[in-house]
Amino acid sequence: MPQARLANADARSSLSQNPKSKIQNRDARVQRRWAMVLLGVLTLLLTWVPVPSSAQTPSPTPSVNNTAEAPVVVDGQVLFNVKNVGNFTAAERAQSINKALEEEVLSKRAVELEVVPEGEKLNIRSRTSDRVLVTMTEADVIPGNEKLKQAAQWQRSIKTALQQSKLERTSSYYRQALLFSIGVLLGAIAIHVGLHFLGKFASRQLTRWLGDPRFTLNPQARSAKLFLQLSFLGVQVGLWIAVAFYVTDILPDARSWRYKLLKLLTSPVLTLGEVNYSALQVLQLIALTVGLWFGVSALTRLFKSSVLVRTGADSGVQDVIAVLTQYILAFLGMIVLLQSSGLDLRSLAIFASVVGVGIGFGTQNIANNLISGLILTLERPIKVGDFVKVGEQMGIVKRIGARSTVIQTLDQVSILVPNSRFLESDVINWSYGDPVSGLKIPVGVAYGSNIQQVQAA
């Protein structure tokens, strides 16, 4: 009878855990999808954004007003650059020229320009509005070029840009651009859906091909499938970025906002040592760092499944070697990454010390768990498969991670326990030294029961 009651209780417990298991599986699938989206965006960012080169020349941080050159822009299209002249900086000259060209674009008059000499200067003037749009000096002349010839080139560039801007503001052009944009969006949706189904088909074929245990690449089937999915995801994200660039390119106002956004992202926002970094370069460095961590993790798993498993060493020893290899490769990769971006590591000494103190106070629990995980991996007081009790939690150790350890209870519930708890609290390991263990299970019976029958049961 007591055994029957216990069996029924276990059955009810297992049934009650089924909804939790379904919720956990659903949450795991959602997390994997978001991880794939993040990796796809990072892959595309690493592909589209140029990698910082070590040939980057250090230069002091220039202010906006002291820049040697500044671009003349019409509706997001750069025509040419002007330089500092006398008391006027290049930025001030470019701002004045851009404002005059913007007023000329909004006017209803036809575009008629002429080059008028004025002493040592050459003025590009609008005949219809009788306004000087650009004044070219000796400082603006490109070495090896003649002043009058360059003025004529500037005149043609300005005239072409003004005519195009006026044309792009007509109602007929807006209707045509709207139709083109709708067609491009519909085509992009069709291609996106096609890539989605093609990715599923290719994934099934790859699983069928690599699913054979006799195949050499069978242990890397999961990594190959993930790489294939990320490749298709990267193509889809790249498709929509290309669509966004095309749509904003055919609309003048959208093209201007795109130019301002790219200018903001490429402007210096951070100076380390004597090297300037823009917001785009900072984002690129962060993306490269995250990509480095994912790449090192994948390489470590490949090294463990292809090399360490074949050595026949204990699983705990394999985990130790894999974790140390991952940390060493990540550290060396970060050094190479920072140096290749033109960053002098000596300039980070004081900055790293100050930031390290702040991070130490803010993330001391995380650092404590990471170091505790390394100690657990090296000393191995617990191993995968051990039956342990930590505080009120009791179960089988399923995985020892860098920050936490997974324990599966007798109710088939997985619990994440921070690694520091194994070093800061009393731990009972029934499998330590000898896998044979005994457990005391209290069984209650009714008063007045026959003791001999209870013992026999």
Image: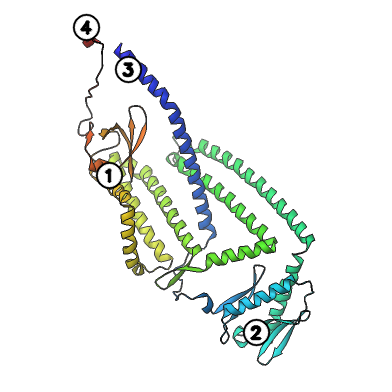
Name which residue lies at 64% across and 55% down.
Answer: 243
Taking the image as drawn, is residue 18 in sight? Answer: yes
Q: Is residue 313 left or right of residue 180?
A: left
> Is residue 212 visible in the rendered structure shown here?
no
Q: Amino acid at mark 4?
A: Asn
Q: Give x and y (percent) for residue 22.
A: 46, 30
- Mark 4 lies on a secondary structure that is loop
- Crowdedness near tag 3: few (<14), some (14–19) or many (≥20) residues, C-alpha within 10 Å: few
Crowding near pointer 4: few (<14 within 10 Å), some, many (20+)? few
Residue 420's disc is 1
Q: Work out how far the residue at label 1 is from the one at label 3, CA to CA, in angstroms.
A: 35 Å
- Where is mark 4, residue-wise? 450
Q: Nearer the viewer, residue 270 or 402?
A: 270
> Mark 4 to mark 3: distance in Å?
19 Å
Circles 4, 3 touching at the beta carbon (< 8 Å) = no
Q: Residue at x 52, y 56 (%)?
A: 45
Q: Circle 2 is placed at which residue position? A: 136
Give the quarter of the image for residue 261: bottom right
- For badge 3, the amino acid type reads Leu
Q: CA distance from mark 4 to mark 2?
A: 113 Å
Q: Which mark is residue 6?
A: 3
Labels 4 and 3: the sequence-earlier one: 3
Question: In the drawing, does residue 346 fall left or right of residue 187?
Answer: left
Please tell me which of labels 4 and 2 falls first in the chain. Answer: 2
Q: Residue at x 29, y 13 (%)?
A: 2
First in residue order: circle 2 vs circle 3: 3
Q: Pointer 1: residues within 10 angstroms few (<14), some, or many (20+)?
A: many
- Amino acid type, callout 1: Ser
Whole-Å distance between the Cαs marked 2 and 1? 70 Å
